[in-house]
Image: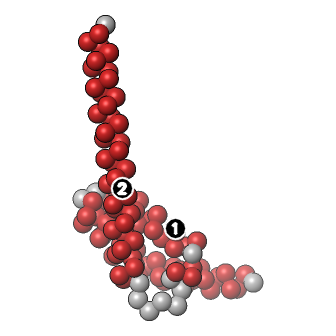
């Protein structure tokens, strides 16, 4: 049983080494942020680690990886927009509160 897990670990390491740099570079190109690109790539490969059926035995994963990366970036941008809107509202309420004092 442990040998089977070791084999999967080795296959994932090979898959990771072959694909992580491409995913991270694509994410960096779109986000313009090394930190965000690293986080996105790590999240994608963490998800893939927990779902080996998605990557094991696949000849090519390039289009899948780029699509998943793009979707993760869209999610990041949506989250950043929500955060910015919240910060703007808090800032506005703070200014109103100071004005009313």
Residue denoted by label 1: 46
* Nearest the eye: 39 or 58: 58
Counting residues from the start of the chain, the first of labels 2 and 1 encountered is 1
Judged left or right of residue 35, residue 15 is: right
Is 82 placed above or below 74 here? above
Is 101 placed above or below 92 here? above
Q: Quadrant of residue 9?
A: bottom right
Residue 96 drawn at (x, y percent)? 28, 18
Tally of numbered tags:
2
Judged left or right of residue 95, residue 50 is: right
Q: Residue at x 46, y 77 (%)?
A: 16
Q: Residue at x 41, y 84 (%)?
A: 61
Cα distance, mark 2 to mark 1? Answer: 17 Å
Residue 32 drawn at (x, y percent)? 24, 59
Residue denoted by label 2: 76
Q: Residue at x 62, y 86 (%)?
A: 7
Q: Which secondary structure, mark 2?
A: helix
């Amino acid at each position: 049983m442990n040998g089977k897990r070791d084999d999967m670990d080795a296959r994932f390491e090979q898959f990771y080494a072959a694909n992580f740099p491409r995913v991270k570079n694509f994410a960096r190109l779109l986000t313009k942020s090394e930190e965000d690109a690293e986080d996105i790539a790590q999240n994608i490969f963490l998800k893939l680690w927990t779902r080996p059926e998605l990557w094991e035995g696949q000849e090519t994963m390039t289009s899948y990886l780029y699509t998943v990366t793009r979707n993760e970036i869209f999610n990041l941008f949506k989250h950043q927009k929500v955060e910015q809107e919240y910060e703007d509202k808090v800032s506005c309420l703070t200014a109103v509160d100071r004005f009313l004092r």
